[in-house]
Amino acid sequence: MDQNIKKLALRQISYGLYIMSASDGTNHSAGTINWLSQASFQPPMVMVAVKADSRLYELVEKTKVFAINILSDSQKQIAEDFFRPTTFEDNKLNGHSFIAGDKGAPILDEIYAHFECTVSGKMELGDHVIFAGEVVSVGQRGDGKPLEMSTTGWFYGG
């Protein structure tokens, strides 16, 4: 397989950018993700891929709860802020204020929409784990257009 063509082909899949977060009440983790899709209407479910060697994976595996914080198209910097390991200082994650969601996952103050999920299943594939999550809590603070990978100049995948 030609590796350059493989990258070009796989990078044609369209993706949004989101901050996925989890907490056990003491430890917190959050990271920028883009492999996310709705998987079911009833019950409402999503599937999300998380790096298997990440702290985020460890907390979701432990708590069976995660949140998806939806970034607007003007929040590229927030996505960048969560490329690095999570820091928790002054009640902020990587410098961003948050509240605990209904199920305890961190919800960033700056985002315009979010949802929390309870894990219904998982599948280990390569270097990522796919979690299936039932959407159990939602919130919206305003309108927005979601941040998409294609508008950032970044690539993840391929």
Image (cartoon, rainbow, N blue to C red):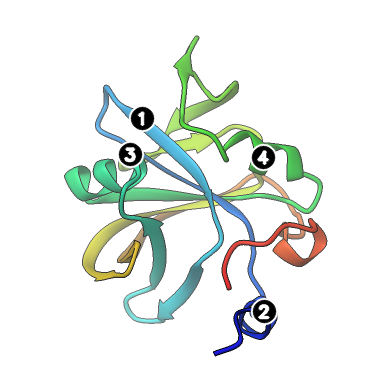
Q: Which of marks 4 and 2 is nearer the N terminus?
A: 2
Tell me the number on the disc at residue 28: 1
Q: Residue 55 carries which label?
A: 3
User: Real-space Cα distance between discs 4 and 2?
Assistant: 26 Å
- What amino acid is found at the position of numbered circle 2 in the picture? Asn
User: Given contact means CB atoms under 8 Å apart, are the residues at marks 1 and 3 in contact?
Assistant: no
Q: Quadrant of residue 105?
A: top left
Q: Which residue lies furthest to the front in this view?
A: 2
Q: Which of marks 1 and 3 is nearer the N terminus?
A: 1
Q: Residue at x 55, y 35 (%)?
A: 108
The reply to whether callout 4 and callout 2 are in contact (CB within 8 Å) is: no
**In the rendered view, does 89 fall on the left or right side of 18?**
left
Amino acid, disc 4: Glu
14 lies left or right of 104: right
Is residue 28 depicted above or below 2 in this figure? above
- Residue drawn at x 77%, y 67% is 150
Residue extending furthest top?
A: 90
**Whole-Å distance between the Cαs marked 3 and 4?**
17 Å
Q: Do the residues labelled 2 and 3 touch (CB within 8 Å)?
A: no
Query: Which residue, given by chain and number where applicable, does mark 2 sit on?
Result: 4
Alpha-carbon neighbours of circle 1 within 10 Å: few (<14), some, or many (≥20)? some
Q: In this view, does 137 lie above or below 94?
A: below
User: Label 2, label 1: how many angstroms apart (C-alpha)?
Assistant: 37 Å
Provide the secondary structure element on which disc 4 rests.
helix
